[in-house]
Structure formats: C-alpha cells, structure tokens
Image (tube, coloured by chain):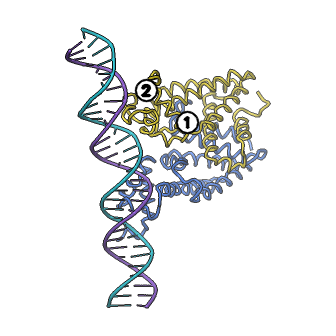
Chain colours: A blue, B yellow, C cyan, D purple
DNA sequence: AACGAGTGGTAGACAGTGTCTATGAACGAG
DNA sequence: CTCGTTCATAGACACTGTCTACCACTCGTT
C-alpha cells in the first residue's frame, strides 16, 4: 500500500482540487471525489462529516496558495509601496483568472462554512498586510477603508472579467489597461508617490 | 379559475421571485417552485425546457427591476453628472443589499444561460448610460474603461459586503463611508467637477 | 496467547433533485 | 361528431448528500 502513506483526508482534498481545476465547482460532488480517490462514497464522512466541510478544506488550499503567491510577489518586488501594491493586485488577478474554478469556490460562501476553518485566519492577516502597504503607498487616506475599496475593485474585476462582462463593456481583451485604471484611481496616477 | 387568468409561465416566475427573496438561490428548485405554484413538477417544462431557463427568467425580473430603479434615481437626481453617478452607485448598492438573494442569482453565471434571454439587452444599455454619465462626470478619461472599473468596484463592494468581509476588514457597519471612498477614487474628490 | 474495543472503510437505504416519456383531459376547427 | 393540438399529470431514471448497519483490522490489556 504505497498510496495510503498519505492520509485519506489529504488524498480526498487532492482529488477535489484536481477535479475543481478540471471541471469547476459544480463538479465537486462528494461521491465523485470519493470515486476519484478510489474509496466508497461513505468514506469521506469520517474526515468530513458534511459536504461543506470537504469543500471548505478544498477552498482552504486555494487561500493558502493565493497567500503564498502574494507573499512571493511582494518579496520579488522591491520598487516601493506603490509598486508592491501593483504587484499584489496583478498577482491577485492572475490567480483569480488562472485558477478560475478555485477562485469561484473560494467566494461561494453558500458552499463554505465561512466562519470556521481558518479561512479568516488566512485572509485577514493578508488583508492587514495589504492595508499596511496601502497606508504607505497613499499616506493621506484611511488605510483600511482604502484597502477595502481596492480589494473590492479587484474582486469585482476578477468576477466580471471571468464572466466576460467587462470585455464586452470595455472592448478590451487584456485586463492590463483596466487594472491600470483601477490602480490609478485608488493610488493616484502612476508617477506620483 | 381566477388565478389562471395570468399565465402559468408568469405564475412560475412569480413564485420563483418570492421563494428567492424568502430563502435564497439555493431554494430555487424546479419542484419547489412547481409546488408553490400548485402544479405538478413536470408542468414548468412546457414553458422552461430546462431548470436554467426558469432561473434565467427569474433573474430577468431582477435585471428589469434594477434598471427601473436606476432610471428612477437618475430622473430624481438633477445635480449634475457627478451627483447622478453617485446616486446610481448608491441605488445599485442598495438594490444588491436589499435584494441579496436576487442579486446573488443575477451574478451566478453558472445558473444562468448567460448569453441568451435579453440579460445582455437589459444590462448593456444600462452600462452604456453609465459610461456616458461617467464621461460627463470625469471628462479626461476613457469613459468605457472608467465605467468598467467603477462598476467592478461596486460589484465587489456589493459581494464582499454581503459576505461581511468588508465589515470585518474596515470595521464599518454602514457602507456609506466605503462607498464615498470608492466614488472619490474613481470620480475625484467630492468638490471637483 | 486471546480477547475486547476502537478505528477506518463498505454497502445499502432514504428523501430529494432535474430530466424524460407516456398518458390523459379539455377544447376549438372541420 | 371527430380529429388534432394544447397543457398538465404521473411515473420512471440516474444522481445527489446524509444516515446507519456492518465488517475487517489493529492494538493495548489481561
């Protein structure tokens, strides 16, 4: 038995992540995940008493992944706060678009037990980091409010872009110009500090 | 028979809208809608061959309702383009928060047959109107892009606010200040024109 | 060494879902 | 009167999430 050296719990989440990437959140049936893991449909119940908890564990992988990418991008970008915010924003958007299914799941609060399971513990510190950067990048403003506004804008772009509404509305085919517009609006024009 | 003078088609959508307001998108089962309309579970099929089409018809009511409110708000507000954009934004957000279930459904593209069914015919003109206003309010910018950015921000605020993430992040309990932040970012500070 | 208790997974049942199909009632046109 | 057409009913099917009874296995205790 060389595949049970990783626990069934992890293998279920692995299968879920793969299935999510391949077919989207709608395909994340409990039974299909069990099937792909090679166990019976009742097996997941021992580790995830309910479907929501399994989905939440899968989404947790997404939050951790996103946090890792953001931190990586911030370490790579050393051009001052404004450039760091821009890098963070671009990373966030790229994640949302490249991992569309995962991103969708992460914000389907009806599928996740929102309160529990460290989602808060993963994304709140990330937001605080974001707010600190914004505070440095645009010194005058209320940092938390400004960060909330920019985050909302990014989330909105991610969502509406994936649904192709923004391409239709703006005529763009790349999200770069729109992202620049958003950043300029929230951080001031590019040259400023 | 005094309730069949409105067609079954309309009664189904009515029941769906009511159910949506009462219990959210998850409760919008074909069979439950049929039950509440007082017909068998197979009856809707004649008017809505698939579940998605019924849901799309329900969402269509939402788009029409939103468009009506926006036009009403614009007629009521006569203080120039910037004030009109602000009124539109506030109306949009209030709709999203007061009709949370409907708004959620309207942007669940996995439940709607996005292309078809005049959603495009309802919301694209609305967006063009929006872009024109923006063009008047902030004359320098690319109107479509600026409108797209602001729309995305509004959508993001609506979504994250409902999910209570923004309250948690900003500490606010009313979305007013955050909305002002968003508007100031995209339209310039309040006094300007 | 033998046993009893957990642990971890199986398999079947149940109510509920969306879709499909066969059936039947009502009704207007010829 | 009869034939078609329209509209709704009812049952079946495969599938879902949850629940429960069962069983194989391991491990610590006596």
Residue B34 sits above or below residue A102 on the image: above
Query: Residue A5 location in percent, x, y?
Result: 41, 71
The circle drawn on residue B102 is: 1
A32 lies left or right of A133: left
Task: From the viewer's side, name the closer residue of A193 and A28.
Answer: A28
Local SS, label 1: helix
Quarter of the image that includes the N terminus of chain B:
top left
On screen, residue A107 above or below B77: below
Please tell me whether mark 2 sits on a helix, a strand or a loop: helix
Give residue C11's quadrant in the image: bottom left
Mark 2 highlights which residue? B8
Q: Residue B160 carries which label?
A: none
Q: Residue at x 48, y 39 (%)?
A: B28
- First-in-chain label (2 vs 1): 2
The residue carrying pointer 1 sits among few (fewer than 14), some (14 to 19) or many (20 or more) residues within 10 Å by Cα, namely many
Rate crowding at label 2 as few (under 14), some (14 to 19) or many (20 or more) other CA atoms within 10 Å: some
Quick check: B33 above or below A90? above
The answer to whether any part of residue A165 appears in the image is yes
Q: Which chain is indicated by disc 2?
A: B
Closest to the observer: A94 or C11? C11
Q: Position of residue B144 (x, y in %)?
A: 60, 28
**How many numbered circles does the render carry?**
2
User: Is residue A117 shown left or right of residue B174?
Assistant: left
The reply to whether the C-beta atoms of the residues labelled 2 and 1 are less than 8 Å apart is no
């Amino acid at each position: 038995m060389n595949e049970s050296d990783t626990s069934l719990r992890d293998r279920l989440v692995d299968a879920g992540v793969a299935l999510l990437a391949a077919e989207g959140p709608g395909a994340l049936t409990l039974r299909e995940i069990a099937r792909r893991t090679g166990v019976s449909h009742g097996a997941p119940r021992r580790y995830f008493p309910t479907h929501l908890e399994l989905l939440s564990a899968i989404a947790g992988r997404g939050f951790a992944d996103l946090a890792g990418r953001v931190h990586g991008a911030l370490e790579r970008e050393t051009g001052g706060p404004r450039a760091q915010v821009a890098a963070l924003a671009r990373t966030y958007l790229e994640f949302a678009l490249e991992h569309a299914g995962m991103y969708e799941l992460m914000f389907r609060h009806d599928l996740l037990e929102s309160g529990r399971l460290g989602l808060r513990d993963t994304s709140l510190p990330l937001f605080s980091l974001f707010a600190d950067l914004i505070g440095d990048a645009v010194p005058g403003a209320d940092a938390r409010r400004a960060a909330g506004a920019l985050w909302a804008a990014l989330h909105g772009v991610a969502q509406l872009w994936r649904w192709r509404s923004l391409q239709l509305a703006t005529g763009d085919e790349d999200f770069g110009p729109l992202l620049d517009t958003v950043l300029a609006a929230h951080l001031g024009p590019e040259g400023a500090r």
